[in-house]
Image: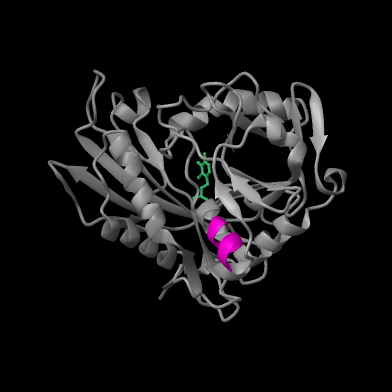
Amino acid sequence: MDLKTTEWSKLDFSYRYVPYRFHAHWKDGAWDEGILTTENKISIDEGATCLHYGQQIFEGMKAQRARDGRILLFRPRENAKRFRESARRLLMAEVPEELFMKGIVEAVKANIDYVPPYGTGASLYIRPFQIGIGENLGVRAAYEYLFVVFVTPVGPYFKAGFKPISLKVESFYDRAASHGIGQAKAGGNYSASLFPLKKAKDEGFNEVVYLDPKEHKYFEETGASNVFFVFKNGSLATPKSDSILYSITRRSLVDVARLDFGLNMEERPVGLDEIDNFAEVGACGTAAVVTPVGWLTYLGKKYSFYADGKEPGPITTKLYKQLIALQVADIPDKRGWLEEIK
Ligand SMILES: *Cc1c(COP(=O)(O)O)cnc(C)c1O
């Protein structure tokens, strides 16, 4: 991408080549120290476990600029921890926190000119991932692993920005099994979601919200973000389940709702039968930030929320504003959630 002509506020959420990425390699029980490379192609064995058996995990984070120009990460050690948890579930070598952080910091610093300016709505998206590589044929864990961190400047995940989206409540397909790998950030969960997502998009929806795989009675999450509900009585809830990915954004919102706004936000199973009590619905995640959901459609019946779904509701808006203010240090970081890249 050409930095001179880039209009930061018009970026979409897509891949753009930047000069450097970080690669580290695990073999014979140890990680090497890792290296920055300009090569964005990877050459691996044709039998690699990532290619055949889905031994692949990833993370998604953002580096953002504060008003004073500092470059900030939001709770990166939570991502490091979740990455290790995902690795454990897929029987992969774990990336220690120090190596994870080193990869992130080096990849961001090497591409510092590509961190979008404050106030443009754009950020430097960070994509750490790990794959099983090496010679292989049979079903087993790999004997070698590659850990990569690449970065790319992005704009909002949903094109319209902070505008209500429409979700299809998926009544048939599941994204994850009840004791499967839904709690791991693994590519396999996404491949399972591509077909239902395409179908929903063809039907005019922005995304899919899945139901619990056991009974199809409780809300789970969308393909790439958690969800939360604001009830007509003013309380909030976000689904608890064995098969969802516990979003760091969601955990942060629970804290913000409770401590900054004195709202009662529960983590509990939220049933389809509660739909008539919803005043507002939102999706949340690193990419989605906080995205208002104006409409849910279940078995062809459309339910609309605040302002007939046409505008973001007041509580969703409050949470959104507080979260982005915290992420770029517009308000003091009392919780120690921010880490500066120097
Ligand atoms: C990454 C992801 C999220 C969002 O998690 P954050 O930690 O908030 O970025 C939610 N659901 C799924 C399925 C995800 O892969």
Q: Quadrant of residue 21?
A: bottom left
Magenta highlight on residue 275: no
Q: In the current view of this chain or complex, which residue is farthest to the bottom? A: 68
Q: Quadrant of residue 296?
A: top right
Quarter in which the C terminus is drawn: bottom left
Image coordinates of residue 33 in percent, x first then y, are 22, 57
Q: In the current view of this chain or complex, which residue is farthest to the front? A: 233
| Residue 86 visible in rendering | yes
Q: Quadrant of residue 328?
A: bottom right
Foreground of the two, 267 or 204 = 267
Residue depicted at 49% across the width and 36% down the height: 241
Does residue 260 sit above or below 94 in this rendering? below
Image coordinates of residue 82 in percent, x first then y, are 38, 48
Image coordinates of residue 271 in percent, x first then y, are 63, 32
Foreground of the two, 43 or 144 = 144
Q: Is residue 62 left or right of residue 85?
A: right
**Predominant SS of the magenta segment:** helix
Foreground of the two, 332 or 139 = 332
Residue range in magenta is: 254-259
| Residue 38 visible in rendering | no
Q: Is residue 149 left or right of residue 286?
A: left
Residue depicted at 28% across the width and 24% down the height: 47
Does residue 24 sit above or below 104 in this rendering? above
